[in-house]
Every structure is written in structure tokens, then in C-alpha cells.
Amino acid sequence: MNPGVEKTGLAARREDIVANGDRSSKVLTLPNILSLMRILLTPVFIWALVCHRPWLAFGIFLLAGATDALDGFTARYFRLKTNVGLWLDPMGDKILLTAALVTLTLPALAQPNTLPLWLTTICIGRDVLIALGALIYVWIRGRTQFRPSLLGKATTICEVMVLLVVLLYNGLGISPGPMGVFYVLTAALAGLSGVHYIISGMARFFATGKKPGA
């Protein structure tokens, strides 16, 4: 490239964001649009289950999962991380997962495989507990960034896999026996990650409150 030629397009965009920090204040970026698509796909997913169209629900859930992978990739590769995306991405994940957990727990919407109520309660209860803890932390200590732990990532992956398998088998109209094992594994990971987040959050909270040299 000729040094005298002004850079345009993605190259200029990437250099601009690098020069101005890791995150920008822009809203309509590709990762944010993908996260918003995931949120908008959630009521369509619910509609598909209400209309007893398991294959359509399965396809929508796959598409929503693809937007999750793509928004993270584009944000990192093209350096399109934004302050809005910091909240919009996890919000899209939780809205979709919560909707899927609740609807697949209802026998009227999920046949022949229905998620056990105790599994849905543990998974959603964990998310609510973490969200409340984060809100209390921000309210007292001020704005901060919470990075997902390895256990948290493993829990999300396990939840997504269980939901995909249940949707797939409901589309096929079969009910495999070993699903109970995956339910227990998912619940165990959710419980462990919830406890880990609470312990690490409390440790961080009290460490932040200490005065230098105390």
C-alpha cells in the first residue's frame, strides 16, 4: 500500500479503535447487531415451540447460537468492542437460554422430552443470584467488569448442549435414556459455578474495600 494513500474501510476502522482504546461508544456495530438479532430471535423461538414446530425451534436456536459465536469473533478480530456490547452480548445469551429453559420445562410445549423442573430452577436461580450480586457490587463499589470463570463457561456450554439435544430429540420424536446423566452434570456445574462466583465476588469485594497499607 502506498504510504501516501489514506486508509479506508476495515483497516482504518481497526486503527481508529486501537488508537482510542479497547472499547468505543458506538452502538450500531456488527457484533451489537448480531447480539440484538439473538434477542429478537427469542420470541420467534418461543412461537415455534408454542406452535409445536420442534424442527423450526431447533433451527432458530442453532441460528441464535451462530450469532453468539460470530459477534464474539467479529468484536475481537475487527476490534469492534463497544461499551454497549459489553452488556448486550451477555444479555442476549441469558434471554435466549432462560426462554429455552422455561419453555422446554413445560410438558405442553416440549414432547417427548421435557427438562426437569429442578434443573431449570438451579440454572435460572444461579443466574439470578449472580446478577443480584453483580448489581449490589456495582451499587456499592462502582462500575467494574466481571469476567466469566472457566466453570461459568463450562456451565453455559453444557446448558446449550443439553438444550440442543432435547430440541433435536423432540424433533425426531424419540426419548433417549441417558439424558438424566447430562441433566445432573449440568445442574452440578451450575451449582459449582454459582458458589465459585459468590466466593470470588465476596473476596474481590472485601479486597477492594481495603485501604492501601491496611
Image: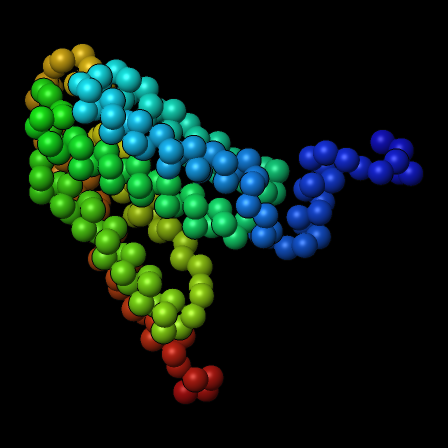
**Residue 189 image offset from top left, x and y in percent:** 22, 45
Decide which of 17, 155 is in the foreground and name it: 17
Image position of 187 with respect to 192: above or below: above
Q: Quadrant of residue 111?
A: top left
Pick whichever, 133 or 177, lies toward us.
133
Q: Quadrant of residue 52?
A: top left
Q: Tell which of 64 and 196 is nearer to you.
A: 64
Quadrant of the frame with the C terminus: bottom left
Asked if residue 1 can be seen in this view, the reply is yes
Say whether residue 18 is left or right of residue 188.
right
Q: Is residue 164 left or right of residue 28?
A: left
> Percent x, y for residue 1?
85, 31
Residue lying at 20% horizontally and 45% vertically, measured from the top left: 123
Displayed quadrant of residue 159: top left
Residue 81 at least partly seen? no
Left or right: 11, with 207 as reference point:
right
The one nearer the camera, 46 or 176, is 46
Residue at position x 38%, y 24% in the image: 63
Residue at (37, 45) in percent of width and height = 91
- Give residue 150's position: percent from left, percent from top: 34, 47
Which residue is situated farthest in the top direction here?
Answer: 172
Query: Quick check: 42 left or right of 180?
Result: right
Residue 208 placement (x, y as % from top left)? 40, 74
